[in-house]
Amino acid sequence: MGGAKNCPETPRQKMISMMYLVLTAMLALNVSAAILNGYAQVDDSLHATIQTMDEGNRKTYIDFKVALSQNQEKVKPWYDNAMLVKEKSEEFYQYVQNFKDEMVQEAEGAKAVKNAKVRDLGKQDDTNVPQRYGLNEGNALILKQKIEEYRDFMIQVTGEEDEMLNKEFMETFATPMGVNADGDSITWENTIFYEMPMCATLTVLTKLQSDIRHCEGRAVRYLLTQTDASDLRVNKFEAHIIPSADYVIRGSKYKAKVVLAAMDSTQAPEFYVNGKQIGGDGMYEVVASGSGRKKITGEVRYLDKKGEMQSMPFEREYTVGEPTASVANKDLNVMFKDWNNKFSVSVPGVSTHDVSVSCSGASVSRSGSDWIIKPTGSGNVKVSVHAKIDGTSRLMGSYDYRVVPLSSPAARFDASRDGRVSLSALLNPSNKFTASSSSVEPVHWTITSFQVRLPNGKEISVKGNSLNNEAINAIRGLKKGSSITIFNIKASGAGTRTLYPISLVLN
C-alpha cells in the first residue's frame, strides 16, 4: 500500500476515477429527481381530490337550500351555521393559497406562476425560501394559530355533540411537536419549514387545503342531517278541509276535501261535517243556496297510538255569489263599427278557460286574455257571457253597447302652425305629414301617399309621409308667401281613407 502511494496514477486510471465521480453524481441526481417527481405526483393527486370535494360540497349546499325552501323555520338555524362554515372555510383556504403564492413568488421571482403546483416550480429543491418565509419571517406561527382557530371553530359550530366528528377535526388539524433525525423534539412549524425543500412544503400546504375542503363537507353534511329535512316522522296532527273554490255561484255545488294531515295510512279516520258523518274518502259537497258568506264546521276522529279516540276540529268559510260577469271595453264604453274592439271579460270564481262570449251583430274572437268584438252593422250590440259550471253552460249576464262609426281623420304637417310653415321646416325630411281623428278613438292613422300642387300648377306624387327629393327640389326655389296644396292624401288605419286637402303657406 505504501508503494502505491508513491506510484502516480496513469492517465487511464485518472479517467476511470473521474467517470466514477460523474456516475456517482448522476446517480444522486437521479434519486433526487425521483423524489421531486414523487412530491409532484402527490401534489397533483391532492389538487384532483380538492376538485372532487368542491363538487361534492356544492351539491350538499344545494340540498341545504332545497331543505330550507321546504321548511324555513326548522332548517334556517342549521342553514345559517352551514353558511358560516362555508365562509370560514373559504377564508382559511384562501389564506393558505396566498401563503403558497407568496412563498413561490419569493422563490421564483419573475417566473412565479399564480396558484402554482409543485411541478410548476423551477426550484423544487430550494430549502432557503421555506425556512426564511416560514420561520425567519414568522409566517409559520401565524399559520399554526389559524389552523388551531379553524379547528376550534369547526368543533364549536357542529355543537360539540358528535364525538367522532370532533375527534376527526382534532386529529386533522393537530399541530403537535415533532422529532428530528437525532431524536430531539422540535416544534410543528420546524417540521414543515426547517431545511425543507419547496416541493415538500408546498405539498404539505396543499394537503392542508384538502383537509379544509374535506372537513367543510363533513361539517355541512352533519348540519344537514340535524335538520331532519328528509325525515317523514309525524309530530303533529291537523285537520284540514280543502275546497275546490272559496267562491261559488248560487245553484252550483260547493266541493271540499276533508283530510287529516300526516294521518296513519293503516287506519281510516272518520269525517264529520255540520254534525253528520260523511264518506270515508272525506269528500264533502252541498248545493250552494242563498247569497253571502257560508261556514262549515266539523271534526276528524282517529285512534292515537294508545288506541284512544281523538278528535280534531276544523272550520272553513266560503262565499256564495249571484250569477254575474264583469265586461269592460278596454278602449271605450262604446263600440266602433268595423273595428276590433278589445274587451276584458271575467266571471268571479270561474276560470277564464270556462268563460265564453257571444254577440248579436258582431264577430267575436279571442286574443290572449282579451276578447275582440267587431260590429258589422249600426245600432246596438248585445254581449252575452256564459260560464261552464259543473259541466253546464250558464248565462252570467248580458250587456248592451252602442255602435258608432269611426270619424274621418284630418291631415296636418307636424311643423306647421295655423297652415303656415317656414321653408327650412318644410324641406326638413324629418318633419312628417300625419293624420289623426278624435282623441277618444283607438285608431292610429298613417299617411301612405299624397300629391303636392305648386303655385305654377305642377303636381308631384309622393309615397310615404314625407316629401321626396323631387318635391323638395321643386319647393326650394319658392318665395315667402307662396302657397302649396297637399291633396289626394291617403291614410291607413281602419282600412284606407282619402283625406281632405291641406294648404301650406311659406313664411
Image: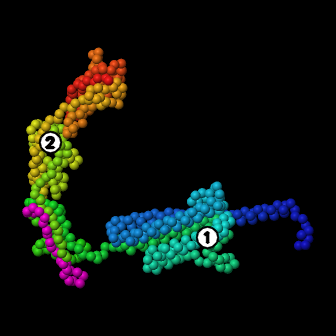
State the extent of the magenta-drawn residues as a range.
288-311
**What colour scheme governs how the chains and residues are painted in the rendered image of this protein?**
rainbow
Residue at image position (55%, 65%) is: 95
In the picture, the disc for residue 140 is 1
Question: Would residue 342 appear left or right of 228 to someone viewing this image?
Answer: left
Residue 292 is inside the magenta segment: yes
Camera-side mark, 2 or 1: 2
Residue at image position (18%, 55%) is: 351
Question: Would residue 180 appear left or right of 337 to someone viewing this image?
Answer: right
Question: Would residue 139 appear left or right of 68 to someone viewing this image?
Answer: right
Say above or below: 333 vs 324. Answer: above
User: Which quadrant does the C terminus fall into?
Assistant: top left
- SS at circle 2: loop
**Residue pointed to by mark 2:** 334
Most distant residue in the top direction = 456
Give the crowd class for mark 1: few <14, some 14-19, many >=20 residues within 10 Å: many
- Residue 23 in picture, x, y percent from top left: 75, 63
Residue at image position (24%, 72%) is: 261
- Residue 231 in picture, x, y percent from top left: 33, 73
